[in-house]
Image (cartoon, grey):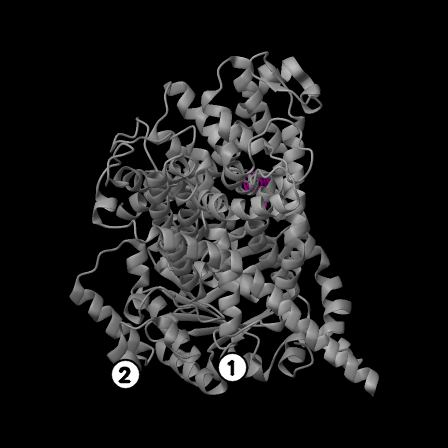
Amino acid sequence: MSDIVLKTENLTASYDEHIVVKNVNLSIIRNKITAIMGPSGCGKTTLIRCFNRMHELSPKAKVEGKVLLIENSNEIIDVYSVDPMLVRRKIGMVFQKPNPFPTMSIYENVIAGYILNGIKLKKSEADEIVEESLKKVSLWDEVKDRLRKKGTFLSGGQQQRLCIARALAMKPDIILLDEPTSALDPVATAKIEELIEQLKDTVTIVIVTHNVGQAGRISDYVAFMYLGELVEYGPTDVIFTRPSHEKTEEFLTGKIG
Amino acid sequence: MKRYLFRIIKSKIISVILTLIVILSTIPFLLVLYFIIKNGISVINWEFLTSLPKPVGEPGGGILNAIVGTAMLVIMALILSVPFGILVGVYLAERSEGRIAFFSRLVSEILQGVPSIVIGIIAYLWVVKPMGHFSALSGGVALGIMMLPLVIKSTEEILKLIPREIKEASLALGVPYYRTILKVIIPAGLSGILTGILTGVARIAGETAPLLFTAFGNPFLNFDILKPISAMPLLIFTYAVSPYEEWWAKAWGASCILVLFVLSLNIITRLLSRR
Amino acid sequence: MANQFIKKLGLSKDTLFNLILTISAVLLIILGVGFFLSLFNASLVSLKKFGLSFFAKAEWDPVQEEFGALPFIYGTLLTSFIALAISLPFSIAISIVLGEYFQKGFFAEVLRYLTELIAGVPSVVLGFWGLFFLVPIVREVEMKFEIPPYGVGILTASLILAFMILPYSGSIGKDAMRLVPNELKEAAYALGATRWEMIKKVMLPYARSGITAGIILSLGRALGETMAVTMVIGNYHGIPENIFSPGNTIASVIANEFTEATGEVYLSSLMYLGLTLFIITTVVNLIGRFILKKLQH
């Protein structure tokens, strides 16, 4: 099939002895937008938090199975056998609530991944990364005159785009978006959706959403999860027009959710 | 209707009386402040701040030994309590459950309530007794133990207020845990931690009881932490209970400086924490 | 290769950091345990010699090496409870006024500052002020009533203690009053209660345990307060006859005699006093904090 960038093998995740993700086998396609949808509590957020090993942050969490990050045909990283920090630098993440660092300026927020990891950048390099990343999220024109101001002064939608820029600045292979628009108004949401579609040329995108409309509008592939299991996965147009599973159909038509 | 009017009037009268009682309760503070400034301000001049005490009967002299002593004691207390207190505070904020957290929090709470004189006894047993003599260091240890719970508590409380999302944002960028704490979480809580430290300084700068049998006092200028040292509150105590009128005047001057210092620290802290 | 190296380094630094945090927390526990053990160990000589009769004996005689803590325990409890009684009406007034009448605004801020700043005045300065302002006043009152005019004594110490603890009980009480849910207050108004009736029937009962916790914690303060008390209590070793008599508290005896204590039994008896004070204040404080914690849940 097409070019796979991330692959899970029998992935099972639990929290406090309670299984949240059950035996998931999923292959994410490079430079496409994959939406993971399902009713709340179905394990979709936990699933992507297993991709970059954020799930294990809570002491009661457990993960079994494999996650493979395929950089190219001869470099395959077994996510759970290397340092989580390395994984997280290659798989970026954007959260539900915009979370710019409160003590940092807009400029510093964009290159926060470098600053905090202690990676020294030349001034010109840093300037370039900041400008490029902010342009990618179409925030450059809005903030270029106040780069030294605190990131927390921006509006919610702007803050979320800043957080996307922060993830992009690390030049990751994949960006995981965990319901990135759930805390935003419709106008800001539209802007972010438009942005996500532009980004897929540079980076693979996995977006978690419980909004069927959003999944339909922006994704190339859709995975539907229910009660911790991956029920159905395939190209968006196929799943939306001819779902093969009755639960998927019920969810798409709003009967569950 | 008449009955209702009576109830309303009663309610109003009580509110006025209660407010008057509260205003009355601030009078001691205003009296103390007035007394100290009235008696103290005329004593304070350049010589008072920059020279050493002279024997009774000789005019002039100052309290330089006590100013230097208090500064040294506070610095020692800060060195002993701030890094240690922040580390424990981080531990308690990060791992609020568990047995170690429970018992360290208990110790911190107990320490906060221990009378300062008892802390003085401990510093005596731990430092003065093994060394065989009084020393500035033992006073610093006593004041450091007093400050410790304040630093721990303010660190723990402020760090718990920092949203989890901020920590996750840093970890998701591949930043190691220790860097996340040191470069993201602690800077985000810095003003709160600073407030706790300033509150602590305001509290220990005026403490006398734990210094009586540790720092002990010293009429001469001393920079050696292994020797006895003077401190503002110690000097005030010695002079206040002495039979000499000129020493009382010096004690008023020293009280005035100490109170203004402590009160301005308190006010700065409040302004800081209100932001 | 480079990645491998960074990986290993990062991992070990995190482990190290976690270790340092845990060690610090454990060290604090050791400090606490050591605190108690040191005090206990230093009291041992006296503890063995006098046992619990230490608390029942009224003599304190360094020459005969006979030591009993009764007068000081009595003095400590007497001054603290009188101080509590004096400060109680003020503390409740502060709780009501700052917790309900003036919650915001300039006047509220000024009042709050003024009621709390007294806590910032060093104890030794308050004692000094007490010696030169309060003692003469008390002496004059005593002369009017034809009591021996010491000026210093239990009452003078209690008065100073009352000022000193007021900010603690007042500010905790105020916080407790502010925690009363608005719906409850509105329900009382809706039934036609006046403001005072609402405060009396709704707010005070609701905030009662918080106000109590504040009073208990301020009692903990009063029991251990040293300098101001030492300076105005008169340092008399017998059991005070009435509230105008001079006396001593546990803390004031330690402050006065520690540096001049010669002989093992004498010093150890002072340590025993310190241990007693430590245990009393810790129990009182933990009770106060326990009530406050239960309120927060």
Magenta part of the protein: which range? B97-107
Question: What separation in Å lies between label 2 and label 1 (alpha carbons)?
Answer: 26 Å
Quarter of the image where one finds residue B194: bottom left
Q: Amino acid at mark 2?
A: Asp
Residue A147, compared with residue C205, is above or below; it is below
Q: Is residue C15 left or right of residue C1?
A: right
Residue occupying image coordinates x 47% and y 78% = A219
Disc number for residue A214: 1
Taking depth in this image into account, of B272 and A196 the one nearest to the observer is: B272
Query: For residue B204: magenta?
Result: no
Which circle's residue, 2 or 1, is located before the other in the chain? 2
Category of crowding for the residue at label 1, using alpha-carbon neighbours closer than 10 angstroms: few (below 14), some (14–19), many (at least 20):
some
Provide residue C45's location: percent of width, then percent of height.
58, 14
Asked if residue A194 shows in the view, the reply is yes
- Give the labeled residue for mark 2: A141
Name the residue rendered at 42%, 79% in the picture: A157
Q: Is residue B106 magenta?
A: yes
